[in-house]
Amino acid sequence: MFSFLDEAGFGIFTGTELLHQFLDVERDTFLTQQKQFQKISEEIGGMEMSIEETRLESVQLESDLSQDPIRNELVPLYSDLMHLTARRQDQDRDERNKLSPEQEREKLVRETKVRFLVKNMNRRYI
């Protein structure tokens, strides 16, 4: 139940009295929005609880990690492994995309021609 002041600020209406003064469409809209608000509020509450549980789990895991010397040694090794794996994938991709000597030569010739044309165009218009 909720209460409101009237337009002049004198009388107090309860929520039910105010709902009776609404038109049917306004009442339906208000009640629908109120249900949606309640549903969203419950969803937000659930998300906040989930976030808090995850935070507490993270704190616990960090505490366990800091107390275990073997895990402390594994973290940098795992990080290095991930870095090296990514680097290896980059090298494999570069190797697959590598041009033959003829293709490389043609590419360089094209780049040189483009640079020469741009340089000549700049001289004409400057």
Image: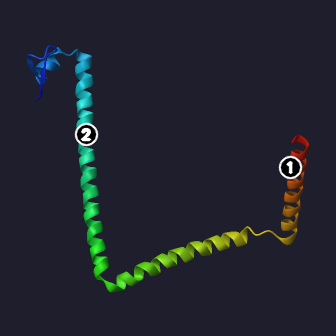
Q: Earlier in the sequence, mark 1 or mark 2?
A: 2
At 89% from the left edge and 54% from the top edge, which residue is drawn?
Answer: 116
* Left or right: 125 in relation to 76: right
Tell me the element at label 2.
Answer: helix
Local secondary structure at mark 1? helix
Q: Residue at 27% across / 45% down in the picture?
A: 43
- Up/down of 118 relative to 71, above or below: above
Lateral position of residue 5 relative to residue 112, left or right? left
Quarter of the rendering containing residue 58: bottom left
22 left or right, relative to 105? left
Figure colour scheme: rainbow
| Residue where numbered disc 2 is placed | 39
Mark 2 residue crowding within 10 angstroms, few (<14) / some (14–19) / many (20+): few
* Residue to which mark 1 is pinned: 118
Where does the C terminus fall, quadrant-wise? top right
Residue 47: mark? none
Nearer the observer, disc 1 or disc 2?
Answer: 1
Q: Quadrant of residue 11?
A: top left
* 111 over 3 or under it: above or below: below
Residue 29: image location, x then y, percent = 27, 24
Figure disc tally? 2
Measured as percent of width and height from the top left, residue 83 is found at: 53, 74
Between 14 and 30, the one nearer to me in the picture: 14
Tell me the quadrant of the picture where the N terminus can be found. top left
- Whole-percent x and y of residue 46? 25, 50
Q: Residue furthest front?
A: 126
Whole-number angstrom distance, CA of label 1 to CA of label 2? 63 Å
Position of 35 relative to 69 (above/below): above
Q: Which sits in the foreground, 47 or 124?
A: 124
Residue at 29% in and 62% down: 54
Within 10 Å of the Cα at label 1, are there few (<14), some (14-19), or many (20+) other Cα atoms? few
The one nearer the camera, 30 or 48, is 48
